[in-house]
Image (spheres, grey):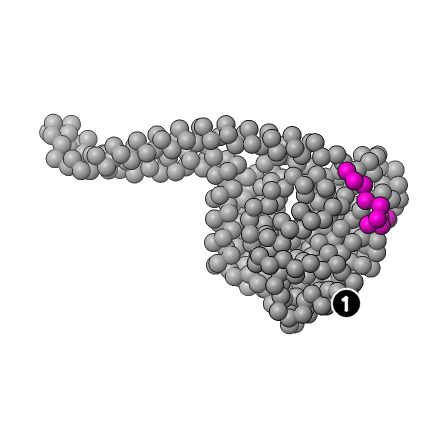
Amino acid sequence: MARSRTDNLNIAVLLPCYNEAATIGTVVQGFRATLPDAAIHVYDNNSTDGTALQAMLAGAHVVRERRQGKGHVVRRMFADIDADIYIIADGDGTYAPEDAEELVRTLLTERADMVVGTRRGVHADAGRQGHALGNRLFNLLYRMIFGPDFTDIFSGYRAFSRRFVKSFPAVSGGFEIETEMSVHASRLKLPVSELELDYGRRPEGSHSKLSTFRDGAKILWMFAMLMKETRPFAFFSAISATFMLASLGFMAPVLAEYFETGLVSRMPTWVLSTALMMISFMLFTAGVILDSVARARAEQLRIHYMGLERPSALKAPLSDAGPVSRARPGKADAA
């Protein structure tokens, strides 16, 4: 990429961490070698093993976030830090800092607002079969509900434009934050790209913070909440159909008896089936109304996103395919 494309760009590397003292120093050093002029920010989420000290010794800017959970850390990072390009990665050493240069190049050449570093071999290296199976199922579920934009919604290695970061609401509190990022991009139809990258194993002494069932349940709940907020018609229609089927199931034998004898001997069952049918109609009506509300909210978010100016270096046409040049943090574009 031409130097003129990045001379006036401020690149920030964001590393949310919780008890990653065994790896964070190496990770920070790797990003400093790959992007020597980028600002590297480590947000320590109540670590008890010296993560903050190791990050400081490696040369990172360290901030403590007291609210426990990756979502809280990412929300704080996006609110605190002003940059033109943001790169987020984990501090556990499973993502190669050397790939950051390719993420930036893809963000610029594709003129994307988010580039996701999809994990090559994640199903083999997930560490536990539960994680690997969960990755497959949740990615399939995401494509069924929200569309085919992404193949690895749980990747923690991403590059963002300023417009994405400053328009992203970030309401989740835990590891489901990556799902929320993906839904935000799909909802607003933002330009996104994927880049397949190697995914490494954790080194000895570093342990995953994920719980297969607890975090899987949280992610499933987040799927439901995001579907309710972004696709209320489909969400409430599915529930409405469930109530309608239950109503018809209770109603069928009562109607059969009535047409055969002219009597209704199971009055409580008839009342229940009628109530279920009324609830079904109410849910369907709610879905129709909330769908209009959701569309209006998406339009407002899109207008806000469009109101955020892109740095001039990101608007310029691509002049060559040379190496990425990193801007010094002091040269950030105020836009």
Place of residue 142 in the rendered image (x, y in percent of width and height, measured from the top left): 54, 44
Q: Which residues are magenta?
A: 323-335
Mark 1: which secondary structure? helix
Vertically, is 32 above or below 239? below
In which quadrant of the rendered view does residue 311 lie?
top right
As for residue 259 lying within the magenta part, the answer is no
- For the view shown, which residue lies furthest in the bottom direction? 205
How many callouts does the rendering have?
1
Q: Would you name the residue on which mark 1 appears?
A: 57
Vertically, is 86 above or below 200? above
In which quadrant of the rendered view does residue 113 lie?
top right
Residue depicted at x 34% and y 33%: 280
| Quarter containing the C terminus | top right
In this orientation, does residue 109 appear? Answer: no
SS assignment for the magenta stretch, majority: loop
Amino acid found under the numbered disc labelled 1 = Leu
Vertically, is 45 above or below 79? below
Place of residue 41 in the rendered image (x, y in percent of width and height, measured from the top left): 73, 56
82 or 58: nearer the eye? Answer: 82
Residue depicted at x 64% and y 51%: 76
Place of residue 60 in the rendered image (x, y in percent of width and height, measured from the top left): 76, 60
198 or 92: nearer the eye? Answer: 92
Residue depicted at x 50% and y 30%: 293
